Image: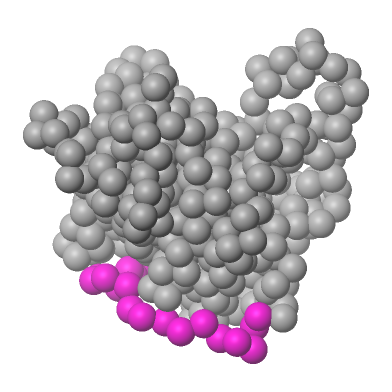
Amino acid sequence: MTATTAPTGIAKYIPILSWLPSYQSDWLRLDLVAGLTAAAVVIPQAMAYATIAGLPVEVGLYTALVPMVVYALLGTSRPLSVSATSTIAMLTAAVLVGVAPGGSREELLVASATLAVLVGGLLVVASVLRLGVIANFISAPVLTGFKAGIGVVIFVGQLGKVLGISVPKGPFFQTIISLLEGLGDLHWPTLLLGLVTLAILIFLPRLFPRLSAPLVAVVVGIAASGLLNLDGYGIKLAGEIPPGLPAFSLPHLSLVGALLPGALGIALMSFTESIAAARAFQAHGEPEPDANQELLALGLANIGGGLLQAMPSGGGTSQTAVNDGAGARTQVAELVTAGIVVVTLLFLAPLISMLPQATLGALALVAAAGLIKVKEFRAIVQISQRELIWALVASAGVVLLGTLE
């Protein structure tokens, strides 16, 4: 991954073949540390993103496993971490509401897995058609505004979990009304736990930057659940999580027509987020990520994930930043992260089932706030007021019209 020349032959389509033979032994320690560090962030976030999508928490873990492994084999970015992202989770939620409103767990799993396969298929087709060039025409201000709008929608949608209020899924302003109407039923133990979790997520990185705040928050939540019997106080838990690796799941072709419009939007966002993150963390002297190969890698990552019950996936900026900052030299770091996910699924499922929903809600709130980048809006103002208008229009469009629209 650190070579300066582009791969040729079969290595052009399976990039790991171009850098693994020249892998240096002194890189292994760095990749191990980076993979373990990234896992401490990816695993809690992936579970929270699954709840944003309205899916069981284990789907987030499945999404942090299969797509990550496939991308490690086929991707062209050294540090890019591919799994669930908050933006894609919100788009997935918008699609599933229309396809399986109030659906059972099984219906949601089938629909989300089918959606992931469809997203992957569209990305593979885009790769065959050499459409990677569209990465050069993505408007950064519009993307900033779009993500900010999604952040606002996620924040409002996840407040109920921290307040202990049951809020039905619906349009943005309907959700606000439901929250206001439900304030009389505020569940104080849930709120207290949510505030403690938020305090950990906000202040711990400032006091102890080397610690993973999401991991600490999850450990504290599970420990409190086991030691204090939080369930007995009416605090809702994640619930039973099936132990073991994900099962093979064929997509349901009957859902393709209903899922296709949303899949197009998710495919575009998956590629947009991924190529932006890959370029942002491209080190000096490294070759630029191959946009068409990235389409292929992301496409097959989504197809592979969907066949094993994952939701749509893409490259996440925050987890890529952690991976890169921890010193990842190659995609071996992501294989290490995937290995930790396997251990979690095989041996830690009973513990994760004790995770309070308020903890997951707080993780989602912090992730949503991270999508609203005030500094980027200020930078846009300094460049062009017209670009700022487009960014604000994109934000307002998400809030007023809906994420997919």
**Which residues, given as a range, are shown in magenta?**
231-256
* Quarter occupied by residue 240: bottom left
List x then y, in percent, for residue 272.
62, 44
Residue drawn at the location 79% of the way across and 10% of the way down: 382
* Quarter occupied by residue 285: top left
Chief secondary structure of the magenta portion: loop
Residue drawn at the location 55% of the way across and 76% of the way down: 114
* Quarter occupied by residue 265: bottom right
- Residue with the most extreme front position: 9
Q: How many marks?
A: 0
Please, is residue 349 above or below residue 360 in the view? Answer: below
Quadrant where the C terminus sits is bottom right
Please, is residue 285 above or below residue 216 in the view? Answer: above
In the rendered image, residue 250 lying in the magenta stretch gets the answer yes
Q: Is residue 169 visible?
A: no
Quadrant where the N terminus sits is top left
Residue drawn at the location 75% of the way across and 30% of the way down: 141
Residue drawn at the location 17% of the way across and 62% of the way down: 347
Q: Is residue 391 visible?
A: yes
Please, is residue 403 above or below residue 353 in the view? Answer: above
List x then y, in percent, for residue 107.
54, 81
The way the protein has been coloured in the rendering is one colour
List x then y, in percent, for residue 367.
53, 38
Looking at the image, residue 5 sits to the left or right of residue 96; the answer is: left
